[in-house]
Image: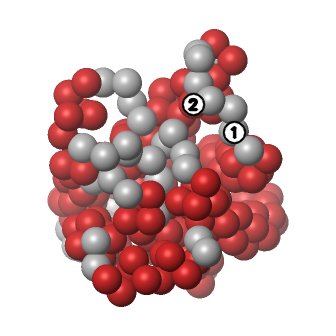
Amino acid sequence: MAVSQLVERRESEHRFFFLVAVLFPLLVLAGFGRTYYLKGFFATPPVSALVHLHGALMTIWIFLFMTQVWLISARRIKTHQRLGIAGAVLGLLMIPVGLFTAVAAAKYGSPSFPPNIPPRVFMVVPVFDMIMFVIFFGGALYYRKRAADHKRLILLTVMNFVPPAIGRLPIAALVTLGPIAFFGIPDVLAFTLVGIDRWRNGKVNRAFLYGAILLTLSHPLRLVLGFSPVWLRFATWLTA
């Protein structure tokens, strides 16, 4: 492949990740605006200190993601690598805080949980969010020296957090569809991106493909597992 084609492909990827770095925060703001970021303008219930901590860590992670994308686009690789250490520490903090927040929401109730699903059943959704985060973010750190795998695994961590934002969008059609929308849209998007990636590069990135499959399979698994006696006993033990 000619050098000019390689350069154009690299620049195209930079533009794509820059677009994700812009759209993802906007989606999060639209989804969580009424209940968190802009709650002062809406008559929504107050949130606990734990939720504030969880929200703060997630917000920092989003800004860190945006910064890292910009650093790569600006070819400031060394700074990107050094900031990656802070990202690893942040990720380690997000995991227990995210799990504790999910357990507290199931135990004490949360306006973010669907009213027609028992809290201990729905708790499986945020718990799996953190499990998927561990897998994708951990894989991205492990393959940090393999840029093609690293950036695609980071993209999967972003897509893992898309369903909670979609599920909170104040759009009646999406609310009516429920899991079909907030799980289905990211799943279709994931495999669309895998297909585009295959078309552009002439080969499938296995980390991206396997990660998309894992993320997609985790969505119906959550719905099945949440109503199982095993999970309900476990959730009851956690929230006791």
Which quadrant holds residue 190? bottom left
Crowd band around label 1 with a 10 angstrom C-alpha radius: few (<14), some (14–19), many (20+): few
The amino acid at mark 2 is Thr
Crowd band around label 2 with a 10 angstrom C-alpha radius: few (<14), some (14–19), many (20+): many
Q: Quadrant of the C terminus?
A: bottom right
Question: Where residue 226 is drawn, which disc sits there?
Answer: none
In-front residue for pair 52/114: 114
Task: From the image, state whether disc 1 or disc 2 is nearer to you.
Answer: 1
Q: Are marks 1 and 2 in contact (CB under 8 Å)?
A: yes
Q: Residue furthest top?
A: 41
Dot 1 or dot 2: first in sequence order is 2
Does residue 124 sit above or below 25 in this rendering? below
The amino acid at mark 1 is Val
Task: Give x and y (percent) for residue 147.
Answer: 52, 71
Task: Give x and y (percent) for residue 95.
Answer: 65, 70
Tell me what residue is drawn at x 20 percent, y 34 percent.
176
Tell me what residue is drawn at x 24 percent, y 57 percent.
187
Q: Which residue is mark 2?
A: 35
Task: Give x and y (percent) for residue 104.
Answer: 63, 60
Which quadrant holds residue 98? bottom right
Q: Which residue is mark 1?
A: 47
Left or right: 61 as drawn, with respect to 215: right
Which quadrant holds residue 219? bottom left
